[in-house]
Structure formats: C-alpha cells, structure tokens
Image: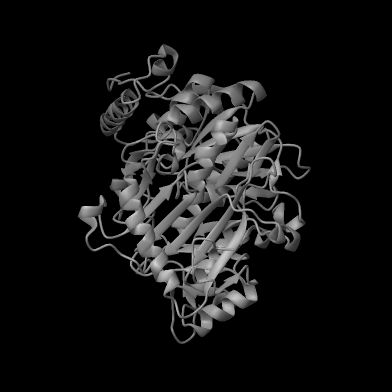
Amino acid sequence: MIDFLKNQNFHRNLTIDELVKHAVSKNEGVIGLNGALMVDTGEFSGRIPRDKFIVDEITSSKNIWWGEVNQKISEENFNHLFNKVIKTYEDLSSKYFVFDGFAGDDKDNSLNVRMLTKKSWQSLFVNNMFIRPSKNQLDNFEVDFTIINAFDVKEKDWKNFGLNSENFIVFHIEKKIAIIGGTEYAGEMKKGIFSMMHYYLPQKNVLSMHCSANVSENHTESALFFGLSGTGKTTLSTNAKRPLIGDDEHGWSDNGIFNFEGGCYAKAINLDKKKEPEIYNAIKHGTLLENVVYDKNSLKVDFDDNSKSDNSRICYPINYVENSLGSKNLPSSGPHPNAVIFLTCDAYGIMPPIARLDLNQAMYHFISGYTAKMAGTETGVNEPVAAFSPCYGGPFLTLHPLVYAQLLQDKLEKHKSPIFLVNTGWSGSSATSGSSRIDLKLTKHIIKLITDGNLNFSSSVRDKFFNLEIPMNLDGLDNNFLVPHKSWKDLEEYYNTGNMLTGLFNTNFNKFDIDDKNLINAGPKAQSGGN
C-alpha cells in the first residue's frame, strides 16, 4: 500500500481510542482536562516558514509564485532529503501510523490525502483535522497527495543542500509528495495540504480561502470570515446561534462554500469558558491540547500561562462543536455568502472597528491583507508586528495573489455579496501604548449585527485615511468608539501614526505592479493634522 516503503509495518486509520492508548503507553502525552490528550510539540510550537520549499520541476514551476513564501529547491536536493526520510521509516522497529482521508467536503473538489507519522498523537491530529472516510471509502482509497512526517530527521549539512537550517518542509508537486523534517509541530501537515489546495483548486475556477464560515439557523445564508491566525476567525465564527461550517480553510465553488477540513485548530492561550464556551466544551476525549501549561499533580490547565508558548492549541473533530454542521451529520458546506468579513488585527489603532467596503476597496484590502502577526503564531514572533499578507493567507499561497483576487472579485460580483472590514485589534490607541485590545464582546456584537442584517448605513461617516464607510448610531456601540479620529485622545499622534500606516500600505501595494486606477485609488491617502 505504501509503495515507496519497504517497511510495511504500520497502523492504518486507528480509532481515537486506539490512538490515545498508543500515545499514553509511549509517553507521548498524558490524559488531562475532560479526558483530552495533552502533548508538547518539542522545539517548535509554531510554523517555520523560512524552512518551506517547493521542488523546481517542469510540471509546476511555471505556475508557482516564487519568492520568500515558495522557495526553490532542486530535484537532486529533494531526492537526498527524501531518501534520508524514507530510510528512517524503513529502519523503524515499531509500527508507524498511516491516516488516509479527505481535504475538501465536496466530492467534486476534494483531495485524497495520506499522512505518515511516527508518533501516535500526530496521527490523532490529522484524524481530527481532516475528513474521516467510511470503511467503504477506505477499501477503495486512491491517494492524491502524501505527507511523510519525519520530525526526528535533521540535515546538519543544510547549506550544501539548499536549505536555510537543518529543518525542512519540502513539496514535490509532480510526485505528489511532501516531506517534513526537524519539527514536531503538527500544524505543518495541516497547512501543507492547505498549500496544495491553493495550488489545485484555482485551476478549476474554485477559490481557495483562508477563512472560517458559518450559516444561519435555517441554513439559507452563510458568512465568511477572512483573516490570519490570531484575528478571530475561529472565535467569531463559532456561534451558538449559527451552525459552524468550518474555522479556517474553505473553498468557494459554483455550488457555494465548503470546508476543507474535518476539524478545528483553535488557539488555547487565554481561553475563557464564559467567553468561548463552544471551544471550551469541545475539550473532551479525542481532543488534543498542545503546549498548554498544567500542574503535574492535579493536571489542572492554566490557559493564561504562556510560558510554553503563545501558540498553545486545541485540536478537535468538527462534530465536537455543539452547533456545527458536522455535529448534525451534515456536510460542512453552505450557500453562496450573504456577508464577507475581512478581519484585521490593527496594531496601530487606525482601522475602524466596523466599516463597509465597496468592490474596489474590497479588492484592495484583499490583495493587501493587512493585519498584525500575533505573538506565537510563528517562531520568533514575540509581540504584535504589523504585516501584510496577500489574500489574508500569504504564507500558504502557491500561485500569484492576483489569481485568487480575480477569483474573489468574480464571485463577489456574480453573487452580490456585501463586504465588511472588522478590526479586532486596537482602537483609539496603538498596541504599544499599553492599552487593551478591543473587547471581544463588542466585536461579537458587531458580527451579530452584520450576520443578522441589522447594520444601518442611513447615517454614516468616512474615516480619515481609508475613506471607509462607518455606520453610526448602532445599538450598544458608542459613536466615538466607531470612528478612529474621535476615539484617539492625542490627535497629533493619530495623524502621525495614520500617515505612517498609509505609507506602509502604499509601499506594499506597489510591489504588485497593479496599474488599475480604481484599485490604486481605493487605498489610503496621507492626511494633514487639521483635516
């Protein structure tokens, strides 16, 4: 079955009970809160993007968006690393783990994935994160893409093999294989398949998206939530009143929205049972708690303790979310969206908490993908840092950002979906001022106004820098809070900060060499303090 391996000694698609039992018996983790398996991911608790490569080969090279995100590696160097990884599997004295499943809850647009892991908890991770096949589907399973996880393999002679360190994540698109070495962080497998969906689907006129999604109670309306990790995609789409489609990765086809995954990967840091009950209640037998701090005697978890990582995580099947389509044994899919929401965590406090975008503004902000990298999301990021990530998912794009942007524009025009920008970061001051992030209750209230269709723009104003339309007199929200230049106490600092951010936006957008005047004019404009 694993045709490139001589060692055929493996477990295939074990049950949750079996995987947990193996993990505990091999001291990979301990049973803790509500029966969840608690594990540490070793050296890395986040992605290592500088160590991601794609083989430069004839079938895919002309399509790839080469650069910092997708770095080239030669066929020769891939073969060296591949053979090194394979040998460690062939030399194993114990059984390894194989998971076969699907990415994409849409039979016309799914990818059959195979995951090889040496640790049981990593196989539990992919069992939770991907769509689990039926027995009949397993009997007739044909693999479209394989990831081989060899976290214990490093390349000490990394400079001679075109790497940036002794760790590596390498994709060979022609061979439909990826190898992982040096990092135990299981999120690399999840995002690896996401990158491949970003490669295959746009070529079928299907938009691959870094977003969460939910539906109305009667399943007739859906909402998309775009944003990088830490902006609130999981928290804001997980809602007791609106069934969850998925929390992170979706496709938009001619039939509507569909989830890529069969599970959720929520951030655990500062988890509050009262504020995020749907996520907390998903912690049970079969759930993975990664890099959480707990008392070794009582096993009590302290979600506010970031001494292990700011990127502690909770991994669980989507049917563990009480109000999800998966929990109702329904496909994780929905109709074309009646609300598209761009989430941004603005560390500078210039973006309004809520605004409506016209189509040109929507395309400008989608291409720009402004947010802040939150602490812990990537190795070495210890505090919020302003960043631009095209399509709100730059690290995972394999094609040029304009490919995805054009697909989004076509679908927004066709289905007349309204677009909103919601700032979940700071308002009235910057993150460096010591002030708190926008209260989650306020943001949830704003989201409810959007999804319920209760935003009233009969009275609105424009913000100073981005010319975004801000609704006034919203129930439960102060007008000064909604308008950035009214919420800042120091207007001189506000204009200086806004002009600085405007410059960053313009510099970033210029690198795409876009000559569409409508898009260029949709960007921010510098302002003088008296305006």
Q: Is residue 375 above or below residue 74?
A: below
Tell me where residue 295 sits by quadrant. bottom left
Q: Nearer the viewer, residue 95 or 69?
A: 95
Instruction: Check the image and report above or below for 90 versus 512.
Output: below
- In the rendered image, the vertical position of residue 422 relative to residue 116, given as above or below: above
**Residue 289 versus residue 16: which sits nearer the camera?**
16
| Image quarter hosting the C terminus | top left
* Residue 487 pos. (x, y %): 40, 35
Residue 8, given in percent of the width and then of the height, sits at: 54, 71
The image position of residue 35, as x and y in percent, is: 60, 77
- The residue at the point 71 percent across, 61 percent down is 139
The N terminus: image quadrant: bottom right
Instruction: Reply above or below: 509 against 181.
Output: above
**Residue 67 lies in what quarter of the image?**
top left
In the image, residue 86 lies at what x, y percent? 42, 64
Residue at point 63%, 65% (across, down): 281
Residue positioned 34% across, 58% down in the render: 81
Q: Residue furthest right?
A: 218
Q: Is residue 319 visible?
A: yes
Q: Is residue 228 left or right of residue 141?
A: left
Point 39% across, 22% down: residue: 523
Decide which of 520, 156 is in the foreground and name it: 156
Quarter of image, res 17: bottom right
Q: Is residue 477 visible?
A: no
Q: Nearer the viewer, residue 325 or 396?
A: 396
